[in-house]
Image (cartoon, rainbow, N blue to C red):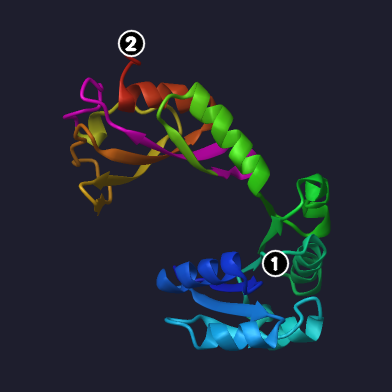
Amino acid sequence: MSKKVIVVGGGEVGSFLAGLLRGWGHDTVLVEENPETARRLKEGANPAQVFCGDATDPEVLQSAGIRGADIVAAVTGSDEVNLTVASLARFEFGVGRTLARVNVPRHAWMFTPAVGVDVALNQAEVLAHLIVEQASTGSMLTLLKLGGGRYSLVEAEVGKNSPAAGQKIASLPLPLDCILVGILRRKELILPRGGTVVEADDHVLALTPGSHTEELRLLLEGPKTTD
């Protein structure tokens, strides 16, 4: 389902995010304060709708169409701006979902639902979790944390000795609340169905509770081997 998303911040992160969302079919508005940057973005390839203005001004947000927005993502290089935008989006305009980028890790404690931030994008924390989880779960990679960290979107490569190799998804003993959401096979994305057969070397995308990550890894990758 298409969503209306307002992305605040036209830097590398914001412009890339807006381009991805637009490419995925979402109605995306990019708000950038710097006139020259806004002009450059408007002239770029496949631009999102670009609005020039200071997003900490409620009138600017309103002119950019925030009252009809489903999601606001504040990803500027200023934590103060990102907090202000998220707070305005939630409490002034009633936007249902807000995301804010954390630039300085020591500021992360401020990015909470109490100030209007549903999801804090703290790159340092994400990297730390990835390092720890990668060390503990073999080659399984955590791509995204959801539900306050209770769930993970993971990628696992199906091993040749995996219990899942050659099996239909409907017959797999998936751990409770685990869902397979995609299979990458020779650069092709396959949407899993009950009759889809899992093959060795497939890269499986799955949504899993954190407590069942290792059980899912064993099912998809098979037991760890030693040389």
Q: Position of residue 41 (x, y in %)?
A: 55, 82
Q: Which residue is mark 1?
A: 76
In the displayed structure, does residue 74 sit left or right of residue 193? right
Q: Can residue 25 be seen at all in this image of the molecule?
A: no
Element class at badge 1: loop
The amino acid type of the residue labelled 2 equals Thr
The question of residue 41 being in magenta is answered with no
Q: Looking at the picture, does residue 225 appear above or below residue 179?
A: above
Estimate the spatial distance between the alpha carbons at disc 1 and disc 2, rounded to whole Å.
Answer: 46 Å
Number of residues whose C-alpha sits closer than 10 Å to that of mark 2, classed few (under 14), some (14–19) or many (20 or more): few
Please give the name of the residue rendered at 33% of the width and 16% of the height, measured from the top-left corner: 223
Q: Can residue 155 be seen at all in this image of the molecule?
A: yes
In terms of depth relative to the viewer, which is nearer, 16 or 181?
Answer: 16
Q: Looking at the picture, does residue 116 appear above or below residue 130?
A: below
Q: Position of residue 120 (x, y in %)?
A: 69, 52
Mark 1 vs mark 2: which is more N-terminal? 1
The amino acid type of the residue labelled 1 equals Thr
Q: Which residue is mark 2?
A: 226
The question of residue 164 being in magenta is answered with yes
Q: Position of residue 6 (x, y in %)?
A: 62, 74
Q: Position of residue 31 (x, y in %)?
A: 65, 79
Q: Looking at the picture, does residue 117 appear above or below residue 108?
A: below
Please give the name of the residue rendered at 51% of the width and 22% of the height, measured from the top-left corner: 136
Element class at badge 2: loop
In the displayed structure, does residue 56 sit left or right of residue 21? right
Please give the name of the residue rendered at 81% of the width and 45% of the height, measured from the top-left corner: 106
The magenta segment: 145-167
In terms of depth relative to the viewer, which is nearer, 32 or 171?
Answer: 32
Q: The C terminus is located in which quarter?
A: top left
